[in-house]
Image (cartoon, helix red, strand yellow):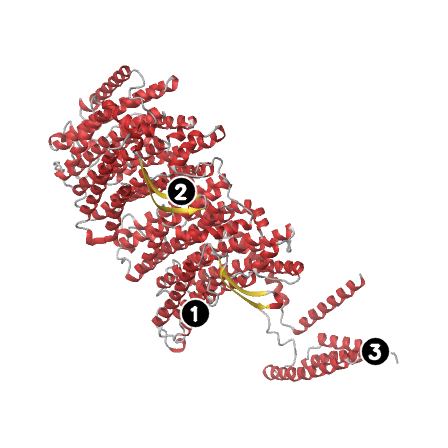
Amino acid sequence: MNPANYLYLAALLFTIGAAGVLIRRNAIVVFMCVELMLNACNLAFVTFSRMHGNLDGQVIAFFTMVVAAAEVVVGLAIIVSIFRSRHSASVDDANLMKL
Amino acid sequence: MADSSFPILTVTAALPAAGAIVTAAVPAARKAAARYTALAFSLGTLVLSLITLFRFDPQGARYQFTETHTWVKSFGLHYDLGVDGIGAVMVALTALLIPFVMLAGWHDADPLEDVTGPNRRWRPTQGFFALILAVEAMVVLSFEATDVFLFYIFFEAMLIPMYFLIGGFGDRAHAGGEEEASRQRSYAAVKFLLYNLAGGLIMLAAVIGLYAATAKQLGTGTFALQDILNARASGKLDLATSTERWLFLGFFFAFAVKAPLWPLHTWLPNAMGESTAPVAVLITAVVDKVGTFAMLRFCLQLFPEASKWATPVIMVLAVISVLYGALLAVGQRDIKRLIAYASVSHFGFIILGIFAMTSQGQSGATLYMVNHGISTAALMLVAGFLISRRGSRLIADFGGVQKVAPVLAGTFLIGGLATLSLPGLAPFVSEFLVLVGAFSRYPALGIIATLGIVLAALYVLVLYQRTMTGPVKAGVAGMSDLKARELVVVTPLIALLLFLGVYPKPVADIVNPSVQHTLSDVHKTDPKPALEAKK
Amino acid sequence: METLIGLLVAAPLLGAAVLLIGGRRLDRSGHLLGTLLALVSFAFAVVLFADMLGKSADHRTLTSTLFTWVPVESFQAQVGFQLDQLSMTFVLLITGVGSLIHIYSIGYMEHDENRRKFFGFLNLFLAAMLLLVLADNYFLLYAGWEGVGLASYLLIGFWQHKPSAATAAKKAFLVNRVGDIGLSVAIMLMFTTFGSFTFADVLPAAAKAGSAQHATITGIGFMLLLAACGKSAQVPLQSWLGDAMEGPTPVSALIHAATMVTAGVYLITRSGAIFNAAPDAQVAVVTVGAVTLLFGAIVGCAKDDIKKALAGSTMSQIGYMIMAAGLGPIGYVFAIMHLVTHGFFKAGLFLGAGSVMHGMNDEVDMRRYGGLRKFMPITFVTFGLGYLAIIGFPGLSGFFSKDKIIEAAFAKGGTEGWILGGCAMLGAAITAFYMTRVMLMTFFGEKRWVPDAEGHEPHPHESPSVMTIPMIILAFGSVFAGGLFSLNSRFVHWLEPVTGYSEGDSPVSTGAVTAGTLVLLVVGVGIAWLMYGRRPVPAVAPRGSLLTRAARRDLLQDDFNHVVLVRGGEHLTRSLVYLDHSLVDGVVNGTAASVGGLSGRLRKLQNGYVRSYAVSMLGGTAVVVAATLLMRAV
């Protein structure tokens, strides 16, 4: 099978994820879209690894997974604490970081 | 000569730095202990700087007591210290003035009432003296640094303690009340910081540009002054004319802001007006001197051709400074702003002397830095005593002071006479040398600058007449004369003014060889008289 | 002997230091110490004089170098003294008259609470003045020059609580500073032209200089003249002298009559070689002198304040000296001779005026004097002898010196000689008029006394002997000095090595000039007698003619200064203060404000919505990627 197809899939997933981050208001969904983008990148890395015949891409994919896991831990904790104080998971409600 | 085993220059700078930390750590209630600690450290520094000065051999190497350590090898950063005659004298001046600044500001920073409760850790006195020591350490290092980047660091870093000294410890005598005073104060502090930061940033760009040029042509980049000079002398480092000019302008701009040269002077009256008199002395007599000193050390040495290229414009700006500052001083209603504008005029003279590129001009400019430091300190500190007695800085609020406080009036007059360069007092020698230096290259500018001596007489005598003579005004009537501590501040300064006015030879002998080095850097020799008549 | 020169200056300097630093505990003895040190200085001067007389004329110059003052490469200023005949003349005059005035002041300032300070300042003046005339180079001379200016400032403003005194002191210092520009520029010109500023180097070089240096030497001459104008109160820098009378009267006698104001004459005579090589500058000098001698005389005619009338006279007499000095070698010696005799009689006249004021509750308006000769006989006689000397009564000091100047002016020859001689003779007539006026209004006529501000009736009385003795000694000088100097042309020969003029005899037929002068003298005295002697003097000044009114206001020079310089200067500084705030500071603050405004607009992008930040991140990434691709493609 042509490895390029995996790249198309990765691009598609990344686009879906980016659109989701921009469009959706619910913090959980935004979060899932970020995960989707990360995984799209992972897919691209693994594909490149396969195409070029070395292991660099796979190694970086593992790094990404670790980072993603860490991010989930921190991110979810923030979302939960925001939800507790505001009773809402909408990202537009949390807009205090401005002058 | 330099005893290479003992790093006296580092210690001279490290002592006040350590003093700053120790003073800051003194407990809140022990205000007196903090004062005496700070004073002791500043006196120790004075002793070290005088040892340096006396052991400096004018006939010896150009830079003495040198210390060289590689700091960051990959960037060519060195911890290089060394003083030439000019540097040694300037370090001594700084170390000399700090104890007087401290004594004059003995109670300036004390909290108005003893704070108890949640704020009991609030200790402005400790902070005030620690900041002064911190400024001293950085100024001393900038006089000693012979590495461009090292100099730059301290040149900029001294802004931080100065910012807090100006913004945090204002003059309590303010016409507009406490709220207006604090508004003006923070305006002045921010203005001081922004002006000098802007100058510093442009200089940083030039410093990096210089590094890039050395890296490109020498293979390894360096900031060390001596390396760069050697490379330029041997032709290995050949800056294009336009590059040299741009780099020169970058350096000069920063120094002209700090000096300050017209039209970059407007931060000075605000800063000196709003800060306490000792801090004002610190600004004009110590910190600003780094600007003019650096013109001599860095602008002329690193960029001789560009310096010569820019000289006509700088000379004109300097003459404008001389006259403009003096005229504005005449028009001031606030004593401290008047002295600030007088300083603008005097810095015009210093820059005039530096860029006259003659022995007389540059030796005169160096002596001028010393003399202006001492004379302004004398005048400003006495003015501070006067202002704190009356609680006002406005000239119109005074009158007839000499009737009630003759010693105060007398010392104020001597400070004023020094400011107007009366022969017999130190500033006369330097002012005349500067004028002779300027005149021998640019006769017209020299004559125009000479008009400054009339204007100086005008602003000093008008100030003296309005404050000290005439009938005794209501608010002045109960004024006390100088106290013992205040006399301790004023008397040595006046004695120095007299001594250096009559016998400036010791200082001149240290300075002259260094000036010759600088002149040979810019490939200039003194103009020969048309008709040599000397026997 | 050489060390004595240094001690000559050091004695009064020590006195000044001790008296000014010593503080209140010297209040009771300070005046004695000050006087003693002035006398010590005079004694040194006499010893040096005797020593000098013992040597042949060409070997009389003593030099002594104390230390190097300012050493910067080729600029080597020494503290060095040179005592030659010219300096010796001045030293004797300064210390002699100075000592007498110290003694006089003991009585005059007896009730002043700051007497110690007064003597300190007087000693400071003596030291500075001696430095001025003993310096062997122009740079050290400059120090003395400004030093006497400082002493003059301190002493004019001695009664600082009076605003008028403080203003007058400031004015004197400022006008002198304008003149000082001349001296500093002259020194700079000497340094750049000759590489030196010592008399020994510059003067011979100026005499030898070729035509290439002619313009420079003329420039030096003009600058020295400017300096002399400031210090010696010559037109156009004369306006300070009248106001300087605010100072205590002994000060007016010593500084503003006998010594300091003659420093300009010293400077020009000392720089004779320069002026001889610069005829254009000489023309300027004689013009200034001639104009001032008439100017001062006219002003002196209109003043009712006795000290201001004498001040006008001083200005006029120094005008004579300056004019003489401008005539070249022939004039120098007579300028100095007139300077010395003037030192005697003018100091005597001022001390007499002070004695009168002392007895009249410090009243200065001559219209409130009258008939005082019976009440203060010694003052009357000494003042009268001074009066006869100044108008040039035959046989008295002024006659010899002034007559010689008039003759020298005519000897200049041509139209110039006639104009100068005419001015000088006219001046002599006016001198006779105004001095007779002073004399008649003060000592003759009926009493016009009025009580002072506190209502005390004046009780005129003779002054104590500590004041009258100096007056008597000065009167002796006024009478005999001129004759003594003229005997065998003694003074001319004495100064010959300095001035280079050896002819003892008068340059022109003396008879005609002397006779003409005497006739004019009689006319002047006669007119004054007709106006003030024959009929009573009105107690309130009549309105007077246009010229009288102008002369009362110093011929409108102050008004000119006020309108042009003071007002103009005020407008200039005020507009500069405004411009500094609005323009120079405004540009910077404007920049800051516009940066602030821009950032205010930019910060609206920071709206707090996470999703809009995400859009900008994405947009930014897209731009970077696009740019990278584009760069690759190109």
Q: Image quadrant of residue C304?
A: top left
**Residue at 49% of width from left, 41% of height from top?**
B440
Residue position marked by numbered label 1 in the rendering: B20
* Alpha carbons under labels 3 and 1: distance apart: 63 Å
Helix, strand or loop at disc 2? helix
Q: Is residue B30 visible?
A: yes
Counting other residues with Cα less than 10 Å from the Cα at mark 3, is it few (<14), some (14-19), or many (20 or more)?
A: few
Q: For the residue marked with disc 1, what is the amino acid? A: Ala
- Asked if badges 2 and 1 are on one and the same chain, I answer yes
* Alpha carbons under labels 2 and 1: distance apart: 43 Å
Q: What percent of the width, then of the height, locates residue C152? A: 29, 41
Between marks 3 and 1 in the image, the one whose residue lies nearer the viewer: 1
Vertical arrangement, residue B125 with respect to residue B202, above or below: below
Q: For the residue marked with disc 2, what is the amino acid? A: Val
Q: Which image quarter holds the N terminus of chain C?
A: top left
Q: Are marks 2 and 1 in contact (CB under 8 Å)?
A: no
Q: What percent of the width, then of the height, locates residue B447? A: 46, 39
- Residue B421's tag is none
Helix, strand or loop at disc 3? helix
- Residue A51's tag is 3
Q: Earlier in the sequence, mark 2 or mark 1?
A: 1
Q: Which image quarter holds the C terminus of chain C?
A: bottom right
Q: Are marks 2 and 3 in contact (CB under 8 Å)?
A: no
On the rendered structure, is B106 left or right of C472? right
Residue position marked by numbered label 2 in the rendering: B454
Q: Which chain letter goes with mark 1? A: B
Q: Which chain letter goes with mark 3? A: A
Q: For the residue marked with disc 3, what is the amino acid? A: Met
> Which is nearer the eye, C2 or C482?
C2
Counting other residues with Cα less than 10 Å from the Cα at mark 2, is it few (<14), some (14-19), or many (20 or more)?
A: many
On the rendered structure, is B205 left or right of B343? right
